[in-house]
Image: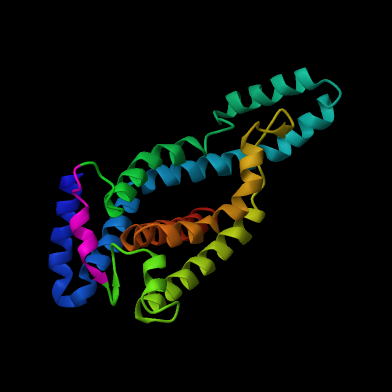
Amino acid sequence: MSVLAGLVEHLADLLQPLCGTASAAAAIVLFTASVRLLVHPLSRAAARGQKARAALQPRIAELREKHGENPEKLQRAVLDLHAAEKVSPLSGCLPSLLQLPAFFLLYRLFSGSSADGAGRALLDHHLFTAPLGDRWTDALAHGGPFGEAGLVYFVLFAVVTAVASFNYLRARRTPPPVTGGQETPGVGALTKAMPFMSFFTLVTMAVVPLAAALYVITSTTWSAVERAVLHR
């Protein structure tokens, strides 16, 4: 954790001539984007898996019509189809799950919650007039929602709302994975909830330090753009 904090601090020093007092905030955004770029191959693998499943849907529909009265036979036929085409019903989910440890590590770093406090030095910097170690409640207590720090949060909330709305519309158009003519257990329910999950980012932003909020915004925006490109 201390190594990552040192990298971000060094990056902030490099950005100081260009970004001034916002150099640490810019370093967080750039560092988060760099990590997302490193795990991009996993996202591509997830997209390939989802496209492969989507390509099988017409054939699964044919099997459903043929074996609809025999659920066990339909289940076997669909599993055999996935095996023959070398497509896993969950092939798009595993790569995404493998990214979670990296994202959780970055969140701990930028929220200053690492055990050795290695990320706490980052929280002494500012994004314009808003300290990276403060929360939205701090901005409200010192100047209100339209104070100097409050306006910084206002802009960030607007960005997150736009990204969440974009994700909502895309998720609504994404069909859930099916196995044996039925939604894959658990995954179907998750898919139905996905259109609303992006809006929870607004809640996260309101309760975490601004440094962690910048990480969340950067990662969420990257995900939205990445999905739009990979699933176009």
**Who is closer to the viewer here, 203 or 137?**
137
**Who is closer to the viewer here, 215 or 38?**
215
Residue at left offset 45%, top offset 62% = 206
**Who is closer to the viewer here, 17 or 37?**
17
Residue 213 appears left or right of 83: left
Figure quadrant of the N terminus: top left
Residue 69 appears left or right of 135: right
Residue at left offset 31%, top offset 61% = 211
Tell me if residue 138 can be seen: yes
Question: Where is residue 14 shown, x and y percent of the image?
Answer: 13, 67
Q: Looking at the image, is 68 positioned above or below residue 188?
A: above
Find the magenta span and give its range. Answer: 116-126
Question: Where is residue 170 shown, x and y percent of the image?
Answer: 60, 58
Q: Is residue 127 covered in magenta?
A: no
Question: Where is residue 223 shown, x and y percent of the image?
Answer: 45, 55
Tell me if residue 55 can be seen: no
Query: How many dots with numbers?
Result: 0
Question: Where is residue 103 shown, x and y percent of the image?
Answer: 36, 46
Residue 154 appears left or right of 23: right
Figure quadrant of the C terminus: bottom right
**Who is closer to the viewer here, 20 or 80?**
20
Residue 130 appears left or right of 203: left
Q: Residue furthest right?
A: 69
Res 99 → quadrant: top left
Q: Which scheme is used to colour this image of the protein?
A: rainbow
Residue at left offset 66%, top offset 55% = 172
